[in-house]
């Protein structure tokens, strides 16, 4: 079988090959045409840019998705791309030392070029474990390629705060949908937390990315105002988003969520055991002095600028308000 591949944007005629690629080579299950369209065509912004590798028999042998997002950088909102679903046919053979011929590199570079042509300013990725190591091998060919590997923490459902913050009292409930109030909360968090750099957390994007997970919202006991929320992956127990307007409220809401899950479990088991989360510098401050554990699992992150008019300083890793899976 020849390894001669041609890299190009996805076309609708590729869908059967894409479905076969997912089913046999993705490692995370198959996909049907409707799901493909819901995930990659009907996004809150532009349709996703999908780069495919086609062999000499016109069969798709690899893919990489570039998902349009919006990213807050200082006072401006820029167009970003989130890299997702890199899938390579297991029958393809390539050298581990010839990075320029590696399908991952070619998918990545073609997607970057296509994104830049269409006016996107930044590309980022939360790669599956092990992919970042491969990307790092050719990172010297990408300007300002930033990477980080974050530890994870775990905390028992039902844990209580050891070091109270003295925040105002909230009541908690499971949310049915993201509303305009979440847009208002995001704008307040940008100003008050503050947030210098981060994925734009407006209701349409949150609905698109997170509506299938457990959403716990915190509201003021006196006036019902939305004060923050926590989103938990139903399958893994990972905290995939957490937002409030101050560090003390973030801590209050995290532990309030843990207690709320206990109450919800009394009616119907929704989450047991431990929650896990991404141990960023901000999360380390929030959890200082609390009883947490550190599983042997890390979350990788990488990003690079495509727009020379945006300073590399503005997107340095310490500026990011970062949550996985956004």
Image: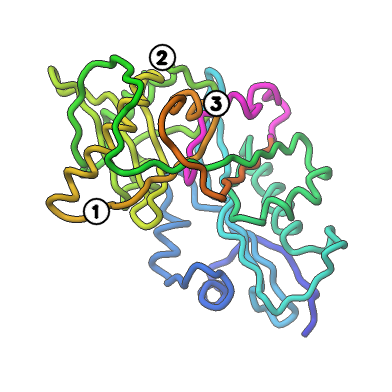
Give the residue displayed 34% in from the left and 32% down from the top: 254
**Classed neighbour count for the residue bearing mark 2: other residues with Cα under 10 Å, few (<14), some (14–19), many (≥20):** few
Q: What number is the disc on residue 192? A: 2
CA gap between label 3 and label 2 equals 13 Å
- Tell us which disc is closer to us: 1 or 2: 1
Residue lying at the far bottom of the rendered structure: 1
The first of marks 1 and 2 along the sequence is 2
Magenta region includes residue 133: no
Residue lying at the far right of the rendered structure: 98
Q: Residue 263: image x %, image y %? A: 17, 43
Find numbered disc 3 in the image and state the secondary structure of the residue it sits on: strand
Asked where in the image residue 234 lies, by quadrant, the reply is: bottom left
Q: Which residue is label 3 attached to?
A: 197
- Describe residue 276's horizontal placement relative to residue 91 as left or right: left
Q: Nearer the viewer, residue 114 or 138?
A: 138
Magenta segment, which residues?
305-326
């Amino acid at each position: 079988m020849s390894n001669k591949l041609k890299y190009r944007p996805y076309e609708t005629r590729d869908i059967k090959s894409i479905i076969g690629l997912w089913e046999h080579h993705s490692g995370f299950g198959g996909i049907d045409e409707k799901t493909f369209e819901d995930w990659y065509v009907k996004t809150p912004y532009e349709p996703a840019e999908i780069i495919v590798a086609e062999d000499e028999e016109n069969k798709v042998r690899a893919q990489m998705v570039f998902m349009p997002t919006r990213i807050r950088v200082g006072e401006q909102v820029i167009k970003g791309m989130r890299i997702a679903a890199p899938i390579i046919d297991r029958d393809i053979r390539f050298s581990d030392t010839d990075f320029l011929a590696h399908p991952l590199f070619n998918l990545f570079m073609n997607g970057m070029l296509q994104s830049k042509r269409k006016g996107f300013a930044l590309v980022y990725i939360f790669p599956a474990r092990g992919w970042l190591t491969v990307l790092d091998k050719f990172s010297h060919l990408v300007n300002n390629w930033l990477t980080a590997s974050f530890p994870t923490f775990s905390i028992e459902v039902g844990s209580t705060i050891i070091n109270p913050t003295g925040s105002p009292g909230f009541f908690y409930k499971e949310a049915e949908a993201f509303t305009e109030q979440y847009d208002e909360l995001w704008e307040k968090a940008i100003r008050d937390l503050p947030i210098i750099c981060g994925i734009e957390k407006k209701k349409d994007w949150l609905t698109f990315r997170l509506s299938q997970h457990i959403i716990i919202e915190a509201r003021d006991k006196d006036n019902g105002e939305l004060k923050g929320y926590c989103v938990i992956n139903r399958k893994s127990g990972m905290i995939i988003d957490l937002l409030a307007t101050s560090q003390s409220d973030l801590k209050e809401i995290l532990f309030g969520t843990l207690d709320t899950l206990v109450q919800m479990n009394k009616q119907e088991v929704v989450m047991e055991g431990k929650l896990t989360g991404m141990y960023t510098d901000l999360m380390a401050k929030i959890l200082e002095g609390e009883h947490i554990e550190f599983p042997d699992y890390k979350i990788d992150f990488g990003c690079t600028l495509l727009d020379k008019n945006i300073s590399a300083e503005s997107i340095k890793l310490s500026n990011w308000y970062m949550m996985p899976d956004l």
